[in-house]
Amino acid sequence: MTKFIAYFRVSTERQGKSGLGLAAQHRKISEFVAGTGTLIAEFCDIQSGKDDSRTELQRAIQLAKRENAKIVIARLDRFSRRVSFIASILEQGIGLVCAEMPNATDFQLHIFAALAQEERRLISERTKAALAEAKRRGKILGSNGRNLAAKNRKAADEFASQLRAKLDADAVRRSYSEIARHLNDAGVTTATGRKFYPQTVKNYLTRSFIGPGD
């Protein structure tokens, strides 16, 4: 049976420690190898896909050459974001298999990589254009944001004052939980029409500078 060497890549150390992204790669490769060959080793790099100088990948390549094994990856984008890098690996005579599309030829891998690279370039250009437009309109957007924030603060202050008027001296000495229960039982709702919770009461009463028993 064909010998395989699994290669995994995650972008950050946090992903590597938590298994975020890594578990899915393991699952894809395990499912593929189970019916086609034997997995003899696993290697994992914690690096950006833009960085092609990977220690663990080089170890995987050397072992693949010694054992006449193929390197299996879960997805092409987990391997590299550059067509030239993928081409350089294939040119070394290393068998590269993508578990997500196991029947793809070397030529097809080149095509898929080229399409993915071009799509990333277009996304980058669209993102830069959107950020430039947002920056150009920054003064207007910032002014609108400040006006809206001021309006919201004023509405919240007014509602807090109205809420204070609904509570007698005895009520405001109760705990936040008791006040919330009292308001809900009385059919009073928040400024957005929702039920009161202890934290909601605390937020409104703090705004009115009133402190209950707890």
Image (tube, grey):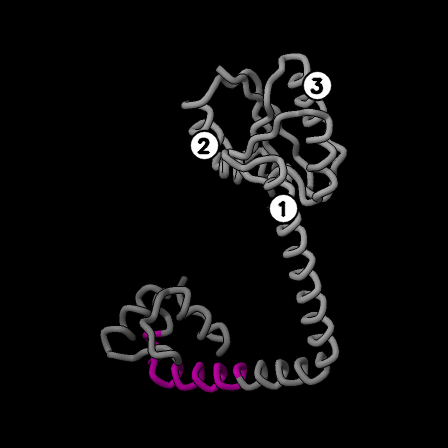
Q: In the rendered structure, which disc, 1 or 2, sits on the residue that comes first in sequence? A: 2
Distance of label 1 from label 2 (alpha carbons): 25 Å
Q: In the rendered structure, which disc, 3 or 2, sits on the residue that comes first in sequence? A: 2
* Marks 1, 2: nearer the viewer: 1
Q: What SS does tag 2 mark?
A: helix
Residue wearing tag 2: 27
Q: Amino acid at mark 1?
A: Ile
- Image location (x, y in percent) of residue 196: 34, 71
Q: Residues within 10 Å of mark 2 (few under 14, many from 20)?
A: few
- Labelled disc at residue 87: none
- Labelled disc at residue 62: 3
Residue wearing tag 1: 111
Question: Along the horizontal axis of the image, is 133 left or right of 33?
Answer: right
Residue under the image location 28 percent in, 68 percent down: 181
Q: What SS does tag 1 mark?
A: helix
- Image location (x, y in percent) of residue 47: 68, 37
Q: Amino acid at mark 2?
A: Arg
Residue under the image location 73 percent in, 72 percent down: 132
